[in-house]
Image (cartoon, rainbow, N blue to C red):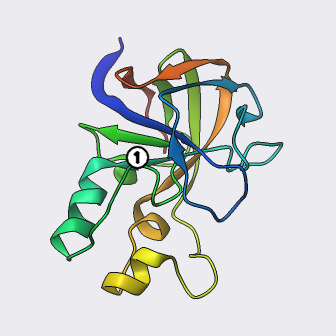
Amino acid sequence: MEHVIGQVLSVNVSEKRGEIKHNINEAFIKENFGLETDAHSGDWHRQVSLLSLSSFNKMRDMGAIGLEYGVFAENITVGGLDVATLPLQTQLKVGEAILEVTQIGKECHNQGCAIKKQVGSCVMPIEGIFTKAVRSGWVKVGDRVEILEKGR
């Protein structure tokens, strides 16, 4: 049985890797590829990245300013669910698409992003998750995020 646990707050893309992403409100997630218009899409294990609103709030509490969705280069910003707590291989239904968690966190770019320079820390390398698209579908702001199957 599906359990509603979160909501899509933004759908973000960028033209180049390492850039801040911008909200486009909706996008098509292609199976084994990712968001069609995003620089991180392709045949690899980090096709779609997700970050929780709780991570934004942590950074705000540390004094970060100007935090728009996409500033951490996440593809999908999620409210109502702490995605960093999901184990690997967890399957999520995000809008019409199904994603599988393949990696939790990553190394920060070069000397760190603008946020790290501003407050001395950044959440994406620790709390951002990466997924592979296992089923195509549209995702848009306001869509539900549901855990279909917990990983191990």
Looking at the image, how many numbered discs can be counted on the residues? 1
- Front residue (pair 128, 23): 23
Element marked by disc 1: loop
Residue 7 figure quarter: top left
Q: Residue furthest left?
A: 61
Please tell me how crowded label 1 is: few (under 14), some (14-19), or many (20+) other residues with Cα within 10 Å: some
Q: Point out residue 107 in the picture as x, y percentages from the top left corner.
A: 59, 75
Which residue corresponds to the image point at 47% horizontal and 25% vertical from the top-left?
94
Residue 55 vs 86, above or below: the answer is below
Mark 1 lies on residue: 86
Q: Amino acid at mark 1?
A: Leu
Q: Point out residue 120 in the picture as x, y percentages from the top left corner.
A: 35, 87
Q: Is residue 97 left or right of residue 146?
A: right
Q: Is residue 43 left or right of residue 45?
A: right
Q: Is residue 64 left or right of residue 12?
A: left
Which residue corresponds to the image point at 34% horizontal and 22% vertical from the top-left?
142
Q: Point out residue 24 in the picture as x, y percentages from the top left corner.
A: 52, 33
Q: Residue furthest right?
A: 43
- Front residue (pair 126, 110): 110
Residue 138 figure quarter: top right
Image quadrant holding the N terminus, namely top left
Q: Residue furthest top?
A: 1
Q: Point out residue 81 in the picture as x, y percentages from the top left corner.
A: 28, 40
Residue 150 vs 68, above or below: the answer is above
Which residue corresponds to the image point at 73% horizontal and 49% vertical from the top-left?
39
- Front residue (pair 145, 74): 74
Which residue corresponds to the image point at 72% horizontal and 25% vertical from the top-left?
30
Residue 112 vs 142, above or below: the answer is below
